[in-house]
Image (cartoon, rainbow, N blue to C red):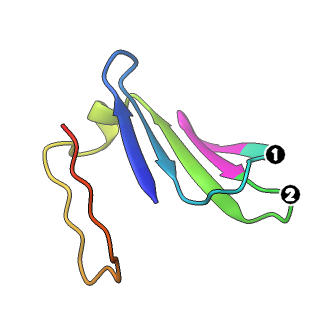
Amino acid sequence: MKITYYPETDSMYMDLSPKDSVDSKEVSPGVVLDYDSEGNLTGIDIDNASRKLDLQELVLNKMPVTKQIMAV
């Protein structure tokens, strides 16, 4: 999973899968879910992210990860 914030557009994309998205659905204003060819969720796009999310803190609880990368 990869989360990227784009300050120039104030948008955030959560890439949940390596599969390509083939369909998208806006579930609320500025929030779009992307799906692969099998209907599985592959990503979440959030416009005006700083108004919808607390971007100052990211907390991961009990994540079974083997690799952590922090980029600023």
Which amino acid is tagged 1?
Answer: Val
Circles 1 and 2, Cβ within 8 Å, touching? The answer is yes
Which residue carries the number 1 mark?
22
Residue 31 relative to residue 40: left or right: left
Q: Which residues are magenta?
A: 25-34
**How many angstroms separate mark 1 from mark 2 (CA)?**
6 Å
Say the numbered circle drawn on residue 55. Answer: none
**Residue 6: % across, % down:** 37, 27
For residue 26: magenta?
A: yes
Q: Secondary structure at mark 2?
A: loop
Q: Is residue 61 left or right of residue 28?
A: left
Pointer 2 local density, CA inside 10 Å: few below 14, some 14–19, many at least 20: few
Seen in the picture, residue 20 relative to 63 is either above or below; the reply is above
Q: Position of residue 34 (x, y in %)?
A: 68, 48
Which structural element holds mark 1?
Answer: loop
Instruction: List the residue tagged with mark 2.
Output: 37
